[in-house]
Image (cartoon, grey):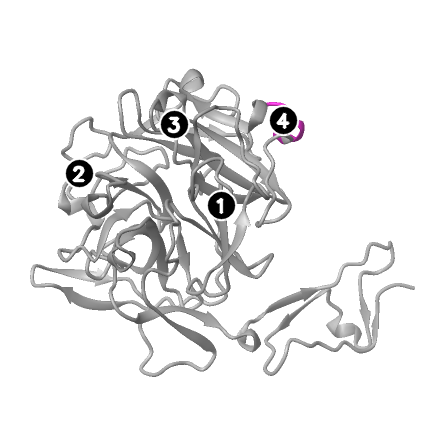
Amino acid sequence: MKTIDKYLLISLAALLLAGCREKVIDERPVKPEQEDDKYIYTKYQNPVIRNNCADPSVFDDRERSGYFYAYSTQNGTSGDANCVYLPVYKSTDMVNWELVGNAFGGMERPQWISGTRIWAPDIEYIDGRYVLYFALGHWENPALSACAVAVSDSPEGPFTWENVKEINPLANEHGMLVDYASQGVSNAIDANIIRDQKTGELYLFWGSFGSNSGVWAIQLTDDGLAVAPGAQKTYICYEMEGTYVHYKNGYYYCFGSMGSCCAGKNSTYHIVVARSQNILGPYVGKDGKYMNTKSSAFNNTNNWIMSNPENLYYAGTGHNSEIITDDAGKDWMCYHAYWQGNNYDGRCMNMDEVLWGDGWPYFKTGHPSEGKVSGPSWLKAESKSGSITIDNDNAKPLLETGDPCSCRNTWDYSPKESNEFNFYDIKLYE
């Protein structure tokens, strides 16, 4: 699971009426009457990435690199000189994005299954390394598809799959995690990784539409590089893909996409959600219908949270990324959509605020926002507080100061004007 460090959480809640039908508890932070000067307030207009950025996965790496990163499905035709096999973007505010390049470096890509393309990545930071999950998707023969893993010391890559087995002897050759041969699940694509908040165990969710498919989950080794010994897969959902699981207030929320993904203006892709108190389910929709029922009963508008607007300014709204919480406590989700503004040429990346009511996530209109709207809020550098730790590897006392009563190895700080710090009368060792 991607753990997001929050510098500030606003935990007040307000009551409001949602429409005319029912009273719901709105769990959003209360908006201040005037802007707080400790924040940088952003404005944006969808799409936030206006070229093809299908199946986006957004990763908060501010703690280490200071950036957010977005990873997406292959952009271009394999073998073409302009193809970016696994695009990587970076941003400081989730509004303005810069293309970094191919996660595998240059024109590199995994080719151990012929005829496949790189689809639907996800990423974690585990044991001091960046672990990138991706699918080798085969459109014509889904049984040839597989989910695999690669590693790097940098979120920008290059990621390599060739040394995964050296890191973990339980790993498969080429970093392959699941395929039809190993798990009996066809269309093994759309990997999502989440850690069980109750047990600490790491799980892979994967799968899609089609015969012998569906969405499944299986436990991985703690380093995320192999299926755990003896692990058995668990059935999660029928006829869904683009799975993402989010934990909040005792519930696991399973988001996914249903409908047609890739038909331009005619795409019917939409985001659904169900929840469970157990990471492996069963997941139940807001209408009480179970996600793992092998029928279309779950796929009804009661369980939809994002779909095409009537004017089709956007179409095929789906395959959401993780929820990112800004410094003011607001939640944001990115997802892809075809956009009328570029004549539906490729799936662009949109972003909208996730609201919460009665324990369920929703979007303001249930459709992508149009026009310029308020975006995420980020603390200014001088407003961020935290701590400074000085370690001493010598056997002498850790720290000695001019005032022995205040001898500590960690100082809390809340700088006002700059990020410069001065220490006086400190003796680190003799």
User: Of discs 4 and 3, which sits in the foreground?
Assistant: 3
Q: Earlier in the sequence, mark 4 or mark 1?
A: 1
Residue 56 higher or lower than 136, as above or below: below
* Residue 225 in view of the camera: yes
Q: Please give the range of residues in magenta.
A: 164-171
C-alpha separation, residue under disc 3 versus residue under disc 1? 21 Å
**Front residue of this view, candidates 196 and 406:** 196
Would you identify the image quadrant in which residue 313 lies? bottom left
Find the distance from the CA under tag 4 to the CA under tag 1. Answer: 31 Å
- Assess whether residue 166 is covered by the magenta stretch: yes
Regarding mark 1 in the picture, which secondary structure is present there?
loop
> Left of 149 or right of it: where is 49?
left
Q: Earlier in the sequence, mark 4 or mark 2?
A: 4
**Dot 4 corresponds to which residue?**
165
Residue located beneath label 2 in the image = 299
- Label 1 Cα crowd, 10 Å radius (few <14 / some 14-19 / many 20+): few
Amino acid carrying label 1: it is Asn
Q: Quadrant of residue 368?
A: bottom left
Kind of residue at badge 3 = His
Image depth: mark 2 or mark 1 in front? 1
- Which amino acid type is marked by label 4? Lys
Which numbered disc, 3 or 1, marks the residue that appears first in the sequence? 1
> Are the two marked residues, 4 and 1, in contact with CB atoms closer than 8 angstroms?
no
Q: State the image coordinates of residue 267 (x, y, percent, origin top left).
A: 21, 43
Spatial distance from mark 2 to mark 1, Cα to Cα?
Answer: 38 Å
Q: Position of residue 306 (x, y in %)?
A: 23, 51
First-in-chain label (4 vs 3): 3
Give me the C-alpha separation between circle 3 and circle 2. 26 Å
Label 3 or label 1, whichever lies nearer to me, is 1
The x and y percentages for residue 172 are 56, 23
> For the residue labelled by badge 4, is the local secondary structure a helix, a strand or a loop?
helix
Q: Earlier in the sequence, mark 2 or mark 1?
A: 1
